[in-house]
């Protein structure tokens, strides 16, 4: 890779936001035909690197270099004109327009009388998808496309701009295994044709599957840069967290007590059918299966967000009223949702307001929130969870993903739940914070909380669960003890190659 042409580089780039030093003399090179991983804990400075490379921000010191020449980007359009494209975790497309209209938004080919030449536009988009080896129809509406297909539309848009540098920021967080494989096939094709790729992910197995080189950041500075083949996953983790990571899955032994949650023949037509299981005090039960198997839908129905067509949910022996989150909360149930940004937090509100939202009635006097009490509760819980915040009055949107997740957990743990349901608790979170959240879940179980955990990460399931329940196509198909649960046994049940015993 050393002989390849450098297409884009940062040279000793420094960027600060007030007293926060987001970048400290960072030097990174992206070369033609190279896939480079950019890794680090949440808040390490990765997003700032992306924004500087994409023209969103200018460095305070240092330079951006394109094709060996220093440049100044006055905005994202300048970076795009230089052949730099960014693919984010959540695609930014217009859902009511077609695939082709999204690809050529604002620069559609024109025919006579300056009318849009749709035939030419569809032909050009079809050629782009043919280059990518993707069978998407140009005239298809974006609404209804999977996140994976929407990301491929974004890649096609980048190619239509003749992008030579592709920056991918957590592109696989919401994808299934087969969708990740297809996306990686497309990225490898672009890399082999001479594009430079920068890949940001917290999933180390994906990094090793796709990337050739790696740059590691910590506290705004680059701490390692080199060939990925020279590192083991354990060495890479130590480079990222700057300390010995004693145990990613710190599972404590907990005394399992009486049944807290009973789910009896729960059904929601079109989503899941005849689901029955129990979770006991001090027990962590994982609900596993492929994306779309119905796991999150079961959790939402238990908590009362979604209606159920049949079946019962009982907490500590008392039947929960259907479709009533307030009844679930009163019974001591807490739900940490999969999508923290849209379902777990109000991003424009402060950290303290988000952290105390579940307690607002108890913090109110004569219709007004007592600010002192609110601040005291938020201070207590953010300290307990070691949440990194500048000021509690700052919008929660200013926090890293891992610290946002801690605020969601604080909000629910403040209610002192007897049952905690966590849906993808460490999705998009760095390895150091993952270990902290795993330790928290284990501690809660040891204190007698019943935990129902939904996770797509098999190492997390195997490392944390006392029992594993596997769903496939809306049905519960296997119940595995901690001793019985392996990656093979879970995947066999999830894919229908082996039937288990219902819980």
Image (cartoon, helix red, strand yellow):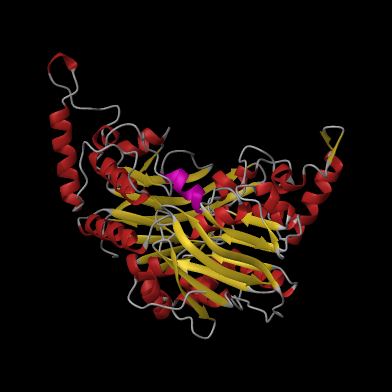
Q: Nearer the viewer, residue 49 or 349?
A: 349
Q: Is residue 319 magenta?
A: no
Visible in this render: residue 54? Answer: yes
Q: Is residue 174 left or right of residue 425?
A: left
Q: Position of residue 460 (x, y in %)?
A: 52, 71
Which residue extends farthest top?
A: 113
Visible in this render: residue 43? Answer: no
**Identity of the residue drawn at 32% across and 58% down:** 179
Q: Position of residue 263 (x, y in %)?
A: 58, 64
**Identity of the residue drawn at 54% across and 73% down:** 238
Q: Position of residue 448 (x, y in %)?
A: 74, 72
Q: Position of residue 273 (x, y in %)?
A: 45, 60
Which residue extends farthest bottom?
A: 483
Q: Is residue 256 left or right of residue 376?
A: left
Q: Is residue 135 left or right of residue 361?
A: left
Q: Nearer the viewer, residue 483 or 86?
A: 483
Q: Is residue 68 left or right of residue 125?
A: right
Q: Is residue 47 magenta?
A: yes
Q: Nearer the viewer, residue 10 or 251?
A: 251
Reply above or below: 75 against 423: above
**Identity of the residue drawn at 62% across and 66% down:** 262
Which range of residues does the magenta coloring cover? 46-53
Residue 94, located in which quarter of the rendered image?
A: top left
| Picture quarter with the N terminus | bottom left
**Identity of the residue drawn at 33% across and 65% down:** 210
Residue 218, located in which quarter of the rendered image?
A: bottom right
Secondary structure, magenta segment, majority class: helix
Residue 381, located in which quarter of the rendered image?
A: bottom right
């Amino acid at each position: 890779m050393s002989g390849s042409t450098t297409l884009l580089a940062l040279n000793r780039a420094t960027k600060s936001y007030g007293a926060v030093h987001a970048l400290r003399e960072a030097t990174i090179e992206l070369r033609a035909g190279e896939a480079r991983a950019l890794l680090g804990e949440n808040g390490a400075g990765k997003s700032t690197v992306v924004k500087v490379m994409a023209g969103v921000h200018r460095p305070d010191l240092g330079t951006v270099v394109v094709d060996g020449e220093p440049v100044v980007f006055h905005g994202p359009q300048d970076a795009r004109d230089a052949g730099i494209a960014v693919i984010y975790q959540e695609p930014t497309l217009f859902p009511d327009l077609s695939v082709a209209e999204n690809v050529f938004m604002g620069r559609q080919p024109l025919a006579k009388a300056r009318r849009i030449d749709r035939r030419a536009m569809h032909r050009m988009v079809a050629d782009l998808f043919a280059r990518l080896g993707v069978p998407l129809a140009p005239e298809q509406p974006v609404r209804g496309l999977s996140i994976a297909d929407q990301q491929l539309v974004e890649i096609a848009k980048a190619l239509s701009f003749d992008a030579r540098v592709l920056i991918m920021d957590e592109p696989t967080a919401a994808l299934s295994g087969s969708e990740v494989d297809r996306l990686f096939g497309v990225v490898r094709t672009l890399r082999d044709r001479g594009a430079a790729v920068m890949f940001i992910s917290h999933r180390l197995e994906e990094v090793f599957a796709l990337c050739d080189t790696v740059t590691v950041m910590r506290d705004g500075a680059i701490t390692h840069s080199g060939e990925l083949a020279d590192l083991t996953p354990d060495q890479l983790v130590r480079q990222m967290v700057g300390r010995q990571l004693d145990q990613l899955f710190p599972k404590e032994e907990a005394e399992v007590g009486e049944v807290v949650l009973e789910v009896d023949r729960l059904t929601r037509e079109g989503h899941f059918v005849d689901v029955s299981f129990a979770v006991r005090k001090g027990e962590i039960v994982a609900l596993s299966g492929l994306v779309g198997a119905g796991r999150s839908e079961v959790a939402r129905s238990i908590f009362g967000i979604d209606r159920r067509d049949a079946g019962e949910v009982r907490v500590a022996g008392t039947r929960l009223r259907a479709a009533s989150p307030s009844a679930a909360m009163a019974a001591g149930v807490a739900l940490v949702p999969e999508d923290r940004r849209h379902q777990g937090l109000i991003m424009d509100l402060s950290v303290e307001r988000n952290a105390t939202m579940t307690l607002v009635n108890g913090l109110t006097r004569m219709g007004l929130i007592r600010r002192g009490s609110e601040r005291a509760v938020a201070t207590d819980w953010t300290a307990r969870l070691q949440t990194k915040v500048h000021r509690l009055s700052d919008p929660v949107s200013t926090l890293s993903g891992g610290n946002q997740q801690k605020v969601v957990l604080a909000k629910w743990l403040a209610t002192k739940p007897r049952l905690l349901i966590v849906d993808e608790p460490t999705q998009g979170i760095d390895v150091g914070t993952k270990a902290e959240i795993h330790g928290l879940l284990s501690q809660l179980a040891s204190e007698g909380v019943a935990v129902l955990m939904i996770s797509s990460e098999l190492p997390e399931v195997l490392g944390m669960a006392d029992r594993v329940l596997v769903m496939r196509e809306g049905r519960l198909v296997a119940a595995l003890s901690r001793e019985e649960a392996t990656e093979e046994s879970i995947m066999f049940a999830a894919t229908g190659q082996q039937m288990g015993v219902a819980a």
